[in-house]
């Protein structure tokens, strides 16, 4: 595993500076600074409602921001040039449940301009070859998550944003999914993945802990455990919260 | 507009439509059943000497009303489902342009609308004994245009609904005033000026006017062309507005 300083000199895949976002009159993100290293998996952790989804929506360009700057692969979020480069997998498996897996993946492939061969490869890589003709509504939760992921991966994105992809799934399926994410990252894709299950922190290269719209810590798994002197990520997170941002 | 993403979206929506056999059946069968029902409602009504059998006129007008009504309901719910399921937000992160999506919906549903109009016209002419001076082809055209207006306004209405329940409530709002003012109940010339003026903003008025011309004359003049163009323009206008109600990024 690469250390945090491995390519500190290289350009970041994503660079966020003093980002604030308001929804209505309420400010939900208060000055976020964040850099994502190319080819790494960054985990975004924090309790429900802490602003994870808003941050992710800002990065993919579907959330209007109030101030600050975001650069994704050298461009503005949502820029035309990025639309084939950035994959976004929303919280609920946002696929057409009344269509088959293949119809779904093929639709997104056509939008991205990917060919039929790429559709087959992506379904195979997602381990869903047997479900090719199956409707998403009749799939298990884990299969539906992977189906949603496949619709983003078919574009062969350089940057992948996954919003709580493992929520509500059993531990075995979660492990499988994380294995899948690692495989994708090893092929050079930068991944930002959110979760509120702290146990999953160990799968990430980098950890970002959020609460109430601010980043409490930007660290890596080993460092977090060491700095907090705890043995589980749950305890570590609680300890970061009680010690405050200064930790 | 991009032909690739536009075509892909139309194809995907057609796939969804054909998967849902029940909706498909409802779209095609409901107008037929309703017109046939009307036939029996009027069948035994005595026609006064020198008077006119009211059914053919009403049946013809229904060819303008029913397609608009059915397609409005189906399209508004279909588009709302896209908005609420999260797929719409996801689509905005892909190269898809919003005009391609709105166009895709319009094309897929308009295909259905033409099929619906053909069936409805066939039943009305062949089984219910309705005749017109003008060709039945014109009737199919007006019915198809009328349903396209329904599609366009259905897409637009979905922007103002949060739930499918609300979307369905827009149907009486959009359809009822048009049924009252379009000339079905009272000839538009006999209505108070304000209502006449209002009826000129309603697409159904033009559909009914066009259908009445097909009934009465063998060749279609500039009035008919004007009605047809007006319907097309209103459909296009609603589609453009619908595209504008779908910003890629939201607050």
Image (tube, rainbow, N blue to C red):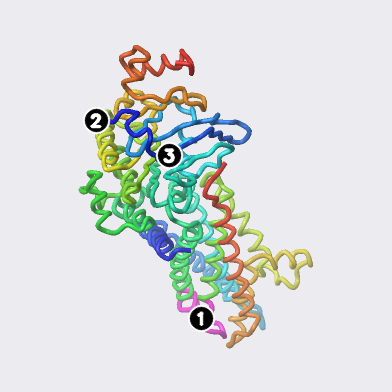
Residue at the (74%, 64%) spot, across then down: B195
Labels 1, 3: one chain: no
**Circle 2 residue:** A172
- The reply to whether the magenta stretch includes residue B129 is yes
Residue depicted at x 52% and y 49% = B248
Q: Identify the subunit bearing mark 1.
A: B
Q: Which residue is mark 3?
A: A14
Q: Chain of mark 2?
A: A
Q: Disc 1 vs disc 2: Cβ atoms closer than 8 Å?
A: no
**Between A35 and B46, the one nearer to me in the picture:** A35
Q: Residues within 10 Å of mark 2 (few under 14, many from 20)?
A: few
| Neighbour tally class for label 3: few under 14, some 14-19, many 20 plus, Cα within 10 Å | many
User: First in sequence: mark 2 or mark 3?
Assistant: 3
Boundaries of the magenta span: B123-139
Q: Which residue is mark 1?
A: B136
How far apart are the alpha carbons under marks 2 and 3?
31 Å
Q: Picture coordinates of residue B50 (x, y %)?
A: 67, 83
Dot 1 falls on a residue whose secondary structure is helix
The relative height of residue B120 versus residue B240 in the rendered view (above or below) is: below
Who's the residue at 55% across and 74% down the image?
B142
Pointer 3 indicates a residue of which chain? A
- In the rendered image, residue B83, in percent from the top left (x then y), is placed at 49, 48
Relative to residue B37, is residue B193 drawn left or right?
right
**Which is in the foreground here, disc 2 or disc 3?**
3
Comparing labels 1 and 3, the label whose residue is closer to the camera: 3
Tag in front: 1 or 2: 2
> Residue A15 at what x, y percent from top left?
45, 37
Q: CA distance from mark 1 to mark 3?
A: 61 Å
Q: Dot 3: what SS?
A: strand
Relative vertical location of residue A112 with respect to residue B68 in this rendering, above or below: above
């Amino acid at each position: 595993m690469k250390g945090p300083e491995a390519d500190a000199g290289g350009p970041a895949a994503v660079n966020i500076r003093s980002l604030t976002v308001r929804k209505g009159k309420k400010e939900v993100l208060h000055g976020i600074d964040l850099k994502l290293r190319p080819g790494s998996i960054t985990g975004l952790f924090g309790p429900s409602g802490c602003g994870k989804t808003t941050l992710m929506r800002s990065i993919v360009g579907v959330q209007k921001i109030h101030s600050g700057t975001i650069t994704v692969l050298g461009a503005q979020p949502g820029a035309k040039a990025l639309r084939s480069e950035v994959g976004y997998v929303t919280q609920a498996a946002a696929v057409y449940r009344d269509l088959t897996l293949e119809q779904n993946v093929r639709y997104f492939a056509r939008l991205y301009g990917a060919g039929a061969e790429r559709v087959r490869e992506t379904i195979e890589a997602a381990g869903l070859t047997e479900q090719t003709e199956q409707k998403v509504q009749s799939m298990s939760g884990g299969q539906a998550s992977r189906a949603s992921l496949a619709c983003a991966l078919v574009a062969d994105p350089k940057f992948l944003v996954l919003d709580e992809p493992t929520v509500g799934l059993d531990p075995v399926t979660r492990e499988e999914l994380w294995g899948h994410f690692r495989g994708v990252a090893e092929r050079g894709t930068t991944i930002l993945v959110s979760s509120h299950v702290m146990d999953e922190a160990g799968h990430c290269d980098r950890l970002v802990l959020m609460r109430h719209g601010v980043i409490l810590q930007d660290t890596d798994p080993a460092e977090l455990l060491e700095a907090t002197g705890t043995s589980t990520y749950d305890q570590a997170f609680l300890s970061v919260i009680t010690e405050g941002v200064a930790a | 507009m991009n032909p690739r993403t536009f075509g892909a979206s139309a194809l995907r929506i057609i796939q969804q439509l054909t998967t849902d056999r029940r909706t498909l059946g409802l779209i095609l069968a409901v107008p037929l059943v309703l017109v046939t029902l009307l036939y029996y409602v009027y069948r035994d009504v005595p026609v006064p000497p020198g008077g006119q059998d009211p059914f053919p006129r009403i049946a013809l007008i229904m060819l303008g009303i029913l397609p608009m009504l059915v397609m409005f309901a189906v399209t508004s719910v279909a588009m709302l489902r896209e908005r609420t399921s999260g797929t719409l937000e996801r689509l905005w992160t892909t190269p898809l342009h919003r005009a391609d999506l709105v166009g895709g919906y319009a094309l897929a549903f308009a295909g259905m609308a033409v099929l619906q109009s053909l069936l409805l016209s066939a039943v009305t002419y062949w089984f219910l004994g309705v005749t017109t001076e003008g060709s039945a082809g014109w009737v199919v055209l007006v019915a198809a245009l009328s349903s396209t207006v329904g599609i366009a306004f259905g897409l637009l209405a979905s922007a103002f609904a949060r739930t499918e329940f609300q979307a369905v409530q827009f149907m009486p709002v959009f359809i009822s005033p048009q049924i009252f003012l379009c000339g079905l109940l009272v000839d538009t010339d006999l209505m108070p000026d304000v209502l006449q003026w209002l009826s000129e903003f309603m697409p159904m008025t033009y559909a009914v006017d066009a259908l009445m011309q097909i009934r009465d004359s063998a060749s279609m003049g500039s009035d008919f062309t004007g009605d047809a163009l007006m319907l097309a323009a209103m459909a296009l206008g609603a589609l453009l507005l619908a595209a504008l109600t779908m910003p890629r990024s939201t607050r």
